[in-house]
Structure formats: structure tokens, C-alpha cells
Amino acid sequence: MNVLVTGGAGYIGSHTCVSLLKAGHDVVVVDNLSNSKRETVDQVESIAGKNVTFYEGDVTEAGFLVEIFAAHSFDGVIHFAGYKAVGESVDLPSKYYRNNLLSTITLAELCQEYDVPKFVFSSSATVYGENASPMIESMDLLPTTNPYGETKAMSERILIDIAKANPGFEVSILRYFNPVGAHESGLIGESPNGIPNNLMPYVTQVAKGIREKLNVFGDDYDTLDGSGVRDYIHVMDLADGHIAALENLSDGVHIYNLGTGRGTSVLQLVEAFQQVNDVPVPYEVVGRRAGDIAVCYADATKAEQELGWVAKRGIQDMCRDAWNYENSVGAESMSQNRK
Ligand SMILES: NC(=O)c1ccc[n+]([C@@H]2O[C@H](COP(=O)([O-])OP(=O)(O)OC[C@H]3O[C@@H](n4cnc5c(N)ncnc54)[C@H](O)[C@@H]3O)[C@@H](O)[C@H]2O)c1
């Protein structure tokens, strides 16, 4: 297939481009590089040994996108582009609603105009809100505690309605749990700007000595050791999940959890990281963080049954590959404002 990947220079998008190319698909990336660098696309090409067509620009701008849709005959779009910093979305809600909703609407409309039948969307487990785990696709969505989460729930709704009104439009909504790790080559990985919001990049930066210690937000949750439990998924498993979703798409809207189905606590992850990589990760338990829930993990059976996809990599692989990337030349040069 000829696939448009929006946000393909970003963390999950770049790994998915590798999987797409390796599966024999052609890839066109559009990214405005607001949270990524052009070099990542070069790294994707060198890992896969195939070329990618790259356009720098904003996917909320239909005028820019029409030329790309006119020039390529796409079979599908995988839409990763968006803002994802939960805390920032609370302070700057309109920035999030504008970017995340307009990008989805614009791309879905262009798919109708240019007869692009397949659309795969990056959603998030955050749409489950305070539901009890395991999270299952048929659950009613509960309000999330931040505008970022709302943009995901609203984008899902918008795509469901557009698909309903346009028979033949095939939509796959993928709800990611907690993507971590990196491609095993160490050439691409997660390089957040500033202080990381997520646990794994924080852990790698503490292990590297860039930050003094890890703050563990709360050890008084009702969990096995009191720290929060999440469903970490290796980013290459997540990438493969997109190929399975794209290749198995059929008419209508299909929603899948992409997770392992297993919960791991913050303290278990820190312990595994120290053991696998033989490096200390000093940490301190501090108060709970606003908006965090105690436990969040997937029921991952629907994706297995319908897509034949399961996450194959374990916590050890995730810790090893994240550390490998942190120690590569790439991580240092890709990140900004790490101090
Ligand atoms: N990383 C996670 O933990 C996680 C979890 C659930 C869902 N998601 C979703 O998955 C998607 C990809 O996440 P990621 O972690 O790879 O983030 P990322 O920031 O690394 O990648 C997003 C990419 O989109 C680009 N972008 C943003 N707005 C754009 C626009 N208007 N036009 C063109 N390019 C634009 C950025 O430059 C970046 O390269 C996002 O939609 C995110 O919300 C991520």
C-alpha cells in the first residue's frame, strides 16, 4: 500500500514507518517538526534500507495537504500528528483542541475528496478515564482529566460519524497504552524536549546522570507495592500493531486496545531497569500527581482475535532498548533542553 504517515518523524510514527517499509509498503511522511527532527526520517531510511518521501508542513492546513493528496494516490493514512503533553494541554487547551481536532477533520475530509479508503488513528488509553482495569473497548468512555484526553475522545467521535456518513471509509482507532523502548538499532527512540512527562525517558535520564533522581508519584495506591500500575508496551510491538490494523481493515469503524494486557508498577519497572542494565536509578517517593489513576492496563484480546496481533516483547526488552537508545549518539543530538 501507499501510505501517508502524519507525524512520521515523531516517536511512534518513526518506528511505525520502519515496520511499514519492512512489510513492503511505500511511505510518505508529513510532519511540521514541531516535536521532532528531520534526521529521524533519514535514520528510518537507513534502518529499513528504503526511501521515504518527506514533506515538512502542517496537517491542519488543507491548502498544503491537497497538493500532496493530488500528487500521490494513497491507499491509507496513519494519523499520528498531534500534541501529546498532558500538563501543557491543561494550560493551553485551545492549542490542543485546534491542532488535534483540526488535523483529524482535515485529513478525514481529504480522504473523502481523494478516495483514500483507509484511516488509522492514534488514540490513547486515557479515553477510558477512571474505568476499572482491564480496560475493554466496549466500555463507556469516562471524562478524562485533561484537554489532551478530550481531544482523543472527540477525534474518535468525529471519525465514527464521518465513517457512518461515508460507507466504504474504513477506520481503525488504536488506543495505545504506555509505549516505551526504542528500535533495537538505537538509531531511533524517544527524545522528549525538556523534563520528560513519561516514566521511561525519565528513568533513562536519571540512570545517565542527566537528572539526579526519579520522583515516584505516590506509594499509597491500592496496588501490589503502592505505586501506580501501567501497561507498558514496546514501541516496536506498537508499530507492528499498526501494520496489522491497516492490513486487516474493513468497512466501518474498528476500535482496538494496543497493550500487553499486563500491568507493571512504577517500582517494578525501576527494579527491572536496574537489573537488566546493571545501572542504579536513584528515586524518591513524593506525593501523588493530579489526574493519575492507580491502575491502567488493557484487555488486549480483541486485537489478538481480529488482527492476529499480540505484543511479543517484555519489560526486560523495553528496559534494554530504552537504555541502548539513551546511550546512542542519537538520543543526545535529538533532544533539546534536557537540563
Ligand atoms: N507516546 C505516548 O505515550 C502516546 C500514548 C497514546 C497516544 N499517543 C498518540 O500517538 C501519536 C504519536 O505520539 P508520539 O509519542 O509519537 O508523539 P511525537 O510528538 O513524538 O510525534 C508526533 C509528531 O507529530 C508532529 N506534529 C504535531 N502536530 C503536527 C501538525 N499539525 N502537522 C504536522 N505534524 C505535526 C510532531 O512534530 C511530531 O513529530 C500522538 O497523536 C499521540 O497523542 C501517544
Image (cartoon, rainbow, N blue to C red):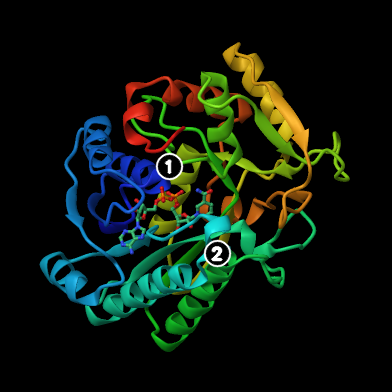
* Residue at x 38%, y 67% (from the top left corner): 119
- Judge left or right: residue 99 versus residue 210: left
| In this view, 140 is above or below 287 | below
Residue type for callout 1: Asn
Residue type for callout 2: Asp
| In this view, 224 is above or below 81 | above
Q: Residue furthest front?
A: 339
The front one of 91 and 80 is 91
The front one of 40 and 77 is 40
Q: Secondary structure at mark 1?
A: loop
The front one of 117 and 59 is 59
The front one of 55 and 175 is 55
Q: Is mark 2 within 8 Å of ligand 1?
A: no
* Residue at x 61%, y 30% (from the top left corner): 314
Q: Residue furthest top?
A: 278
Q: Which residue is mark 2?
A: 91
Ligand 1 shows up in the quarter that is bottom left
Number of other residues with Cα within 10 Å of mark 1, as a class: few under 14, some 14 to 19, many 20 or more: some
Rendering coords of residue 223 (x, y %): 85, 41
Q: Which residue is mark 1?
A: 193
Number of other residues with Cα within 10 Å of mark 2, as a class: few under 14, some 14 to 19, many 20 or more: few
| In this view, 84 is above or below 219 | below
